Image: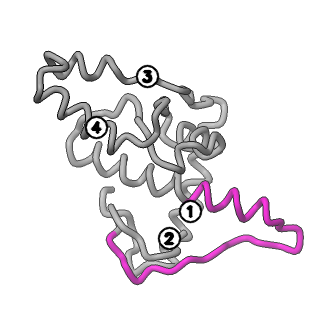
Amino acid sequence: PALTGLGSPWWDPDARGAVFGITRGTTAAHLALATLEATAFQTRDVVDAMVAATGIPIRSLRVDGGAAGNDRLMQIQADQLGIDVERPVDRETTAVGAALLAGLAEGVWSSLDAVAATRAIDRRFVPNTELKVFADIAHAQWRAGLARVTKKVSPPHR
């Protein structure tokens, strides 16, 4: 699960990648799916840590950047988190955000609410509640794998 170490909430730069459970029947597609799942599992751990630290539930996840263009990843993420994942029309939101703040400062928009109203959703990924048990099992298996590639024996937020 860790190709370049693990960041938040694990903070283990020495963690290394590993693939568990492969057989002669494992295909490149299985490995690609495992990579997408690991990305979603790491995001789930960060979201879980945020909720545990603040006590504030997260009702949806807004995504951007290149990975947000992968429909399969976004659906896996929604299923893992159990919340909607919203992908904007314009996925390069860093530049858009800077432009919107500049416009707010110059009076193009009168309020943060007016700025927020400019955001357009390309697609909303809704979690498949029928897969919740399977999503939780897969995440638990990934966590067991983490214990084998990190120095930590339990997640820092539990």
Within the magenta stretch, is there residue 27? yes
Which of pointers 2 and 4 lies earlier in the amino acid sequence?
4
Spot the residue most to the right.
25
Task: Give how far apart the Cα atoms at labels 3 and 4 are.
Answer: 13 Å
Which of pointers 3 and 4 lies earlier in the amino acid sequence?
4
Which of pointers 1 and 4 lies earlier in the amino acid sequence?
4
Per the image, label 2 sits on a secondary structure element best described as helix
Q: What residue would you read off at disc 1? A: 142
> Is mark 1 in CB contact (under 8 Å) with mark 4?
no
Q: In this rendered view, identify the residue nearer to me: 71 or 94.
A: 94
Q: Nearer the viewer, mark 2 or mark 4?
A: 4
Within the magenta stretch, is there residue 56? no
Q: Nearer the viewer, mark 3 or mark 2?
A: 3
Q: Where residue 133 appears, x then y in whole percent?
A: 61, 41
Which residue is pictured at 52% across the width and 78% down the height? 148
> Is mark 2 in CB contact (under 8 Å) with mark 1?
yes
Q: Which residues are magenta?
A: 11-38
Task: Give how far apart the Cα atoms at labels 2 and 4 are.
Answer: 35 Å
Q: Nearer the viewer, mark 1 or mark 4?
A: 4
Which residue is pictured at 19% across the width and 18% down the height? 109
> Is mark 3 in CB contact (under 8 Å) with mark 2?
no
Q: In this rendered view, identify the residue nearer to me: 88 or 58.
A: 88
Q: What residue would you read off at disc 3? A: 120
Q: Nearer the viewer, mark 1 or mark 3?
A: 3
Q: What residue would you read off at disc 4? A: 97
Q: Amino acid at mark 2?
A: Leu
**Is residue 4 at least partly visible in the picture?**
yes
Which of pointers 3 and 2 lies earlier in the amino acid sequence?
3
Per the image, label 3 sits on a secondary structure element best described as loop
Q: Where residue 149 appears, x then y in whole percent?
A: 50, 79
How packed is label 2: few (under 14 Cα within 10 Å), some, or many (20 or more)? Answer: many
Q: Relative to 138, say whether 112 is above or below.
A: above
